[in-house]
Amino acid sequence: MEVFLETNRLLLRRFTEADADHLVRLDGDPEVMRFLTGGPTPREEIENDVLPGILRDYARGPTGRWAAHERSTGEFVGWLALQPPDGGDAADVELGYRLKSSVWGRGYATEGARALIGKGFADLGVRRVWAQTMAVNLASRRVMEKAGLRYVRTFYPQFDDPLPGTEHGEVEYELERPAHRG
């Protein structure tokens, strides 16, 4: 396994074609998908769109989405990401994380997010990290805050099939790379 980043308790590595089952199980958990799509991601979508998209993104630059494993057990626990939006600037990246509900509350998302942000600023040319979630997703907002991001705004996008809580809006948080002091 080629490790991209290591923390005290996590190993982050590139996804491979062999990771479809991991993603199917992760996106098949209704609690994991509650604030994202409201339901599981079909296997066909993961195999034909999601996983190939993750693998293609590695060719775009040093940022991307990485499989997260517990160092002590090797267990796949989810993924963390730093990546620009489609067609976006690689210096302005979105922080993302999706972990199995069985490992929630252990601080893995915060630990991984802090490490990715540090690597992004130090080694990957990142100038700004931002993240968004539903305003009612308090656990995700806490991760953003603990990782050092600050609240920027609440906004109200329109959805064809809104999830419960959408009426409270989406929130955006950000962190800019500190200016070099000489």
Image (cartoon, helix red, strand yellow):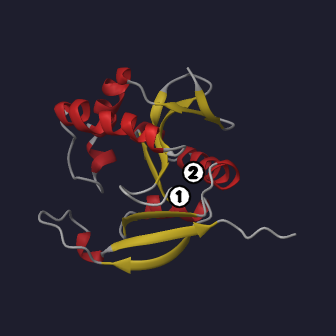
Where residue 2 appears, x then y in whole percent?
A: 58, 24
Which x, y percent locates residue 119? 66, 48
Alpha carbon distance from label 2 to label 1: 8 Å
Indicate whether 66 appears above or below 142: above
Q: Position of residue 13 (x, y in %)?
A: 53, 31
Q: Is residue 177 left or right of residue 44?
A: right
Picture quarter with the N terminus: top right
Q: Secondary structure at mark 2?
A: helix
Count neighbours of disc 1 (C-alpha within 10 A) and say few if under 14, some if 14 to 19, many if 20 or more: some
- Mark 2 touches mark 1? (CB < 8 Å): yes
Q: Secondary structure at mark 1?
A: helix
Residue under the image location 62 percent in, 24 percent down: 72
Residue 47 lies, with reference to residue 111, above or below; the image says above
The amino acid type found where label 2 is placed reads: Ala
Judge whether residue 106 can be spotted in this image. Answer: no
Q: Amino acid at mark 1?
A: Val
Q: Residue at x 37, y 70 (%)?
A: 135
Report the residue marked by disc 2: 113
Residue at the far right: name it: 182
Res. 143 mark:
1
Pick out the residue farthest to the left: 160
| Residue 13 as seen in the image, left or right of residue 135 | right
Seen at 33% across and 78% down, the residue is 155
Q: Quick check: 80 left or right of 117? A: left
Seen from the viewer's position, the closer of residues 130 and 31 is: 130
